[in-house]
Image (cartoon, helix red, strand yellow):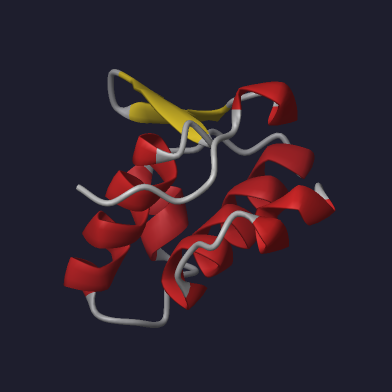
Amino acid sequence: MENKIFKLGLSVEAVSLYLILFDLDFAKVPLEMESISARWNAPEGLLAKAVEELEMNSVIVKKGAVLEINPVSAWTETRTA
């Protein structure tokens, strides 16, 4: 896990989503919404916002129905939509 995630100024939900994604990726589980939703404890609307926030900060990228974690060097600090 990259500690930089805590220094980007992200919401709690976005950081939580990153931790879920990291764990799934480490376990070699595809980063698909079905796998993610099974671990997500907040309302689904917050999950969508967290995905959008991670995308906006280049932490993740959508590749069809699968999410992919970008290299840390691509991550950017929080920006507003």
**In this view, 17 is above or below 80:** below
Q: Is residue 16 left or right of residue 45?
A: right
Residue 34: percent from left, percent from top: 35, 50
Residue 62, quarter of the rendered image: top left
| Nearer-the-camera pick, 65 or 71 | 71
| Nearer-the-camera pick, 78 or 69 | 78
Q: Which residue is drawn at the image coordinates 35% and 50% (left, top)?
A: 53
Q: Which residue is drawn at the image coordinates 69% and 59% (left, top)?
A: 7
Residue 80: percent from left, percent from top: 27, 51
Residue 51: percent from left, percent from top: 34, 49
Residue 14: percent from left, percent from top: 46, 62
**In this view, 53 is above or below 68:** below
Q: Which residue is drawn at the image coordinates 72% and 31% (left, top)?
A: 72
Q: Which residue is drawn at the image coordinates 56% and 64% (left, top)?
A: 15
Query: For the image shown, how many numbered marks are present on the structure?
Result: 0
**In this view, 8 is above or below 67:** below
| Nearer-the-camera pick, 21 or 72 | 72
Q: Is residue 2 left or right of residue 52?
A: right
In the rendered image, the residue lying farthest to the top is: 63
